[in-house]
Amino acid sequence: MRLVPRRFGAIGTTLALLASVAVSLALFPGTANAMCDGSVERAAEFNPYGVPYVDEYAKAGTCNGNNYYDGYFRSLVTDWRASVWIQNNGVYEARYGSYSSLDWIEYDFRDNNSHSGLTFCIDNGYGFWICGWDTNAVAALEPKFDYSSLSTGF
């Protein structure tokens, strides 16, 4: 018999994650790089508050100036879905992972100038999102794009 309704469990989990985020922000800085830095592939991590939430990396050979990006991303938080939001010429499109798996997700996109903004998000499936880049994040009830990184040369 389940004594606590699922929604209350999700709220408790969200509050626990927010508490850990607040403590981590005060204690640990994070680092990250852009995905393509000219012709060089780089790994990236969404690491707000010192807590790693999303990993991403470009496939070898992606950063070649042909306007096509090919990479992998994954959530590092159990039961939270990772997403990558790509901005090109003011238009956003998303690639989503899974709530039930921490496996790597392959994704790709094309743009018209090998010059796109990328934002990482995680969401809990109950309308709570944390989005940003590197150690910068915004928590909200929808995806927010206040922090992103520019990927160039792909």
Image: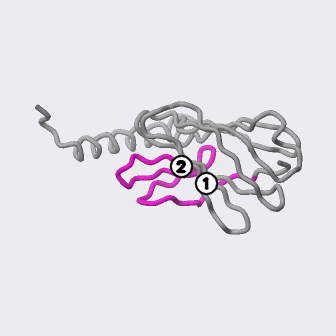
Q: Is residue 143 above or below residue 72?
A: below
Q: Nearer the viewer, residue 149 or 114?
A: 114
Tell me which segment is drawn in magenta. 122-150
Mark 2 and mark 1 in contact? Answer it, CB < 8 Å.
yes
Q: Is residue 146 left or right of residue 11?
A: right
Name the kind of residue labelled 1 in the image. Answer: Trp
Q: Which residue is mark 1?
A: 85
The x, y position of residue 66, in whole percent, is 87, 50
Q: Residue at x 83, y 44 (%)?
A: 37
Q: Is residue 22 magenta?
A: no
- Say which element carries label 1: strand
First-in-chain label (2 vs 1)? 1
As measured in the structure, the alpha-carbon distance from the residue carrying label 2 to the one carrying label 1 is: 8 Å
Q: Badge 2, how many Cα within 10 Å: few under 14, some, many 20+?
A: many
Q: Residue at x 34, y 39 (%)?
A: 16
Residue 141 falls in image quadrant: bottom left
Q: Is residue 113 above or below residue 137?
A: below
Name the kind of residue labelled 2 in the image. Answer: Cys
Q: Residue furthest bottom?
A: 90
The x, y position of residue 85, in whole percent, is 61, 54
- Say which element carries label 2: strand
The x, y position of residue 8, in whole percent, is 22, 45
Q: Nearer the viewer, residue 27 or 10?
A: 10
Q: Badge 1, how many Cα within 10 Å: few under 14, some, many 20+?
A: many
Q: Nearer the viewer, residue 139 or 64?
A: 64
Q: Which residue is mark 2?
A: 121
Residue 72 falls in image quadrant: top right
Q: Residue at x 43, y 40 (%)?
A: 99
Q: Is residue 135 magenta?
A: yes
